Image: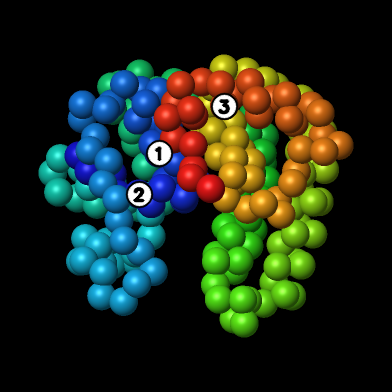
Amino acid sequence: MKLYITPGSPYARMARIVVVEKGLASRVEIVLAQTRVIDSPYYTINPSGRVPYLVRDDGIGMEESTFICSYLDHLDGQPELAPTTGEPEWEWRRLDALASSLMDGLSVWGREIVRPENEQSPRVIRHEMARAQRMTELWEQEIDHAVMRSKLNLVQIRLACTLGLEARNPRFRWRPGYPKLSAWFDSITARPSFAATVPSP
């Protein structure tokens, strides 16, 4: 199989972490995709141009990070990364939606700040900075939830990949004032799968 990624994408990082956690390196080839450029050869592979994108052994392509992560988790018939705390499914889906909201907003912010300065929207940047602040405050409380304190799962992976965007956005300074969230992040990112997929600055 081939997993198309870009090094800075938190969505692609989720899938890369699952590849490591599930011991799939021999089955999944990581391929760098060239996105957001006109006429990239990647668009003939995935017309949407998004990452991650998994091309299965049968040649069928799959898009969307959660879908791909779940597929990879189930490949060996022994899925391990779905939350199993006894909480109702809607509860861990609620937390995953919160992590997704933060990830999506930070991705918008990140794309904005790499544009030429005269093309950046200060309004968009201010909006996403404020959203990130509100969501970080919320996560300082939610991080004690059983789903976030149980064995490694996809909700935890999503949030950690999101907070890891601090490496690419120097204005996303979420640590001060959030000791529980900082300690949780430092603990989970000590895992080899996270260390192996740290985004470049």
First of labels 3, 1 by sequence position: 1
Task: Work out how far the residue at label 3 is from the one at label 1, CA to CA, in angstroms.
Answer: 15 Å
Mark 1 secondary-structure assignment: helix
- Image position, residue 153 (x, y; %): 53, 26
Mark 2 vs 1: CB contact within 8 A:
yes
Q: Please give the name of the residue rendered at 66% of the width and 39% of the height, measured from the top-left corner.
A: 95
| Quarter where residue 77 is shown | top left
- Image position, residue 169 (x, y; %): 63, 53
Q: Please give the name of the residue rendered at 60% of the width and 66% of the height, measured from the top-left corner.
A: 113
Extreme left residue here?
A: 58
First of labels 2, 1 by sequence position: 2
Q: Dot 3, how many residues are within 10 Å of its Cα: few (below 14), some (14-19), or many (20+)?
A: some
Q: Is residue 16 left or right of residue 56?
A: right
- Image position, residue 45 (x, y; %): 21, 60
Q: Is residue 112 left or right of residue 72?
A: right
Q: Please give the name of the residue rendered at 25% of the width and 62% of the height, measured from the top-left corner.
A: 42
**Residue that mark 1 sits on:** 15
- Image position, residue 118 (x, y; %): 62, 82
Q: Looking at the image, which is closer to me, 50 or 119?
A: 119
Give the answer, above or below, for where 129 lies relative to 135: below
**Residue that mark 2 sits on:** 5
**Residue that mark 3 sits on:** 189
Q: Please give the name of the residue rendered at 55% of the width and 66% of the height, measured from the top-left corner.
A: 114
Q: Dot 1, how many residues are within 10 Å of its Cα: few (below 14), some (14-19), or many (20+)?
A: many
Mark 2 secondary-structure assignment: strand
Task: Work out how far the residue at label 3 is from the one at label 2, CA to CA, in angstroms.
Answer: 20 Å
Q: Quadrant of the N terminus?
A: top left
